Image: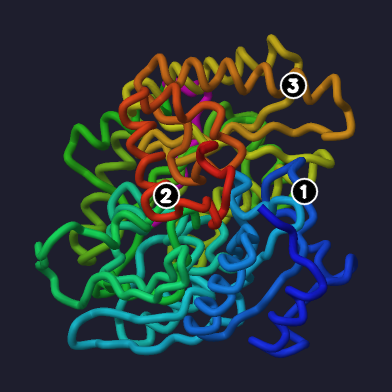
Amino acid sequence: MNPVTPAHADSLRALLSPDRVLTSDEDILPYSFDGTAALKVKPGAVVFPKTSEEVAACVKLAREADIPVVTRGSGTGLSGGSVPILGCLVICLTQMDQILELDEKNLTLKAQCGVITKEIDDLAAKSGLFYPPDPGSMKISTIGGNVAENSGGLRGLKYGVTRDYVMGVQVVLPDGTLTWLGNKCVKDVAGYSMKDLFIGSEGTLGIITEVLIKLLPRPQSRKTLLALYDRMEAAAETISAIIAAKIIPCTLEFLDRTTVQCVEDYAKIGLPTDVEALVLMETDGHPAVVREEAEQMMQLARAHGARDVLVAADEAEGARLASARRNAFSALARVMPTTILEDVTVPRTELAHMVGFIRACAERHQVRVGTFGHLGDGNLHPTFLTNERDHEEMHRVEAALEEIVNETLRLGGTVTGEHGVGLAKKAFVRRQLGEGSYELMRSIKRALDPQSLLNPGKIFDL
């Protein structure tokens, strides 16, 4: 593979315009990393196309020159998926930011890949509609990045993840071909479901430039509760009891003691900082159903050891209580120079054990970890608070993470529930998938991208 040269940069300027091609060190520095700690590599150039056709033209140029391509949105990824490789071409899609259509009759929305996720839900809300996926970065992450990573979010327990709402995608293939996959039809079984191949592919198979997504009628009512616990086991038992009662809330989130302390220091919500666990519960839907489910969840929480249950009186107070969870990462990130947000998922029955294991692991390796996550779907975010310049401590962090991953796999879990594999998890993915599944993935990559042009080195090495 070849790096971008001045001649290549001139060709890119001719394709786009001089102001949409960056090559100077100071200009490309912000595009040498994403939201993943301790990973930084300098690209050769960064370009900003505004149309799918311009993306295709850039890919064709790169292919002819054998230049690797890394695609990027807002750079909020947490697995190193948009970290460049040395000298590569970064195609940044943030200027492809137009919502192309809101179809209220078919309950769909079509957007360019660079549209901010929250803007989609805000526009849908004006028509009484709802885009459920809500990754923690929804105020800054792009819909194209969400699709490429198959992002989750706080409402995943009830509403699912990004994949569940993608009806169609426009994709630039590694040879520069522009293709549309999917349609507005609710039912369609004509051939392979090709769009699903690209959802969650992390930019390794094609570049997603437009997205057609499904919307839902907006819930009429919502109720937010915050339960406080002196034992983590009691919090996990409450979650199991809620699910056993056939209640599927839109949100079941938790924070451990370390995270609660950091959130309160940061956001001043008024949380007690002597709790072992805090559980955020939200139900939405018809007002009568919401009232009933909220009452049931409150009773179940108290029956399973909650010290107290706070119930939001109105939507504003609900947003304040929910901010305890939504501020978790920002609050933890203030504590130390480096914040490593991990992402493992285990069967829900193993949650209490896994949270205890993470705590014990942190003590064994003398590292500081705050744990929060989606308790309702088993997705945990152990977050290491460290300093990447302290090499000895970083070795201890790596050893602790290795133990956490090993225990996750032993319990039948996955090394990533929503952040993707990228660079950060590719050392573990083969162990999870096994040889057959792992080689099948690699064969698909080789078939679609024989030059390994797109995001090479991510997920696996060819």
| Residue displayed at 30% across by 78% down | 129
Q: Which residue is mark 3?
A: 367
Q: Which residue is mark 1?
A: 40
Q: Quadrant of residue 20?
A: bottom right
Query: Element type at marker 3?
Result: loop
Image coords of residue 39 (percent x, y):
74, 44
The image shows residue 140, relative to residue 458, as above or below, that is below
Q: Main secondary structure of the magenta part?
A: strand
Estimate how packed mark 1 is, as few (under 14), some (14 to 19) or many (20 or more) residues with alpha carbons within 10 Å: some
Cα–Cα span, label 1 and label 3: 23 Å
Q: Are marks 2 and 3 in contact (CB under 8 Å)?
A: no
Tag 3: amino acid: Val
Query: Element type at marker 2?
Result: strand
Mark drawn on residue 291: none
Q: Going from the N terminus, do you reach mark 2 or mark 3 first?
A: 2
Looking at the image, can residue 308 be seen? no
Estimate how packed mark 3 is, as few (under 14), some (14 to 19) or many (20 or more) residues with alpha carbons within 10 Å: some
Nearest to viewer (mark 2 / mark 3): 3
Looking at the image, can residue 211 be seen? yes
The image shows residue 392, relative to residue 4, as above or below, that is above
Image coords of residue 148 (percent x, y):
45, 58
- Per the rendered image, the range of residues in magenta is 224-233
Q: Going from the N terminus, do you reach mark 2 or mark 1 first?
A: 1
For the view shown, which residue lies furthest in the front direction?
64
Q: Which residue is mark 2?
A: 225
Q: Are marks 1 and 3 in contact (CB under 8 Å)?
A: no
Tag 1: amino acid: Lys
Tag 2: amino acid: Leu
Q: Are marks 2 and 1 in contact (CB under 8 Å)?
A: no
225 in magenta: yes
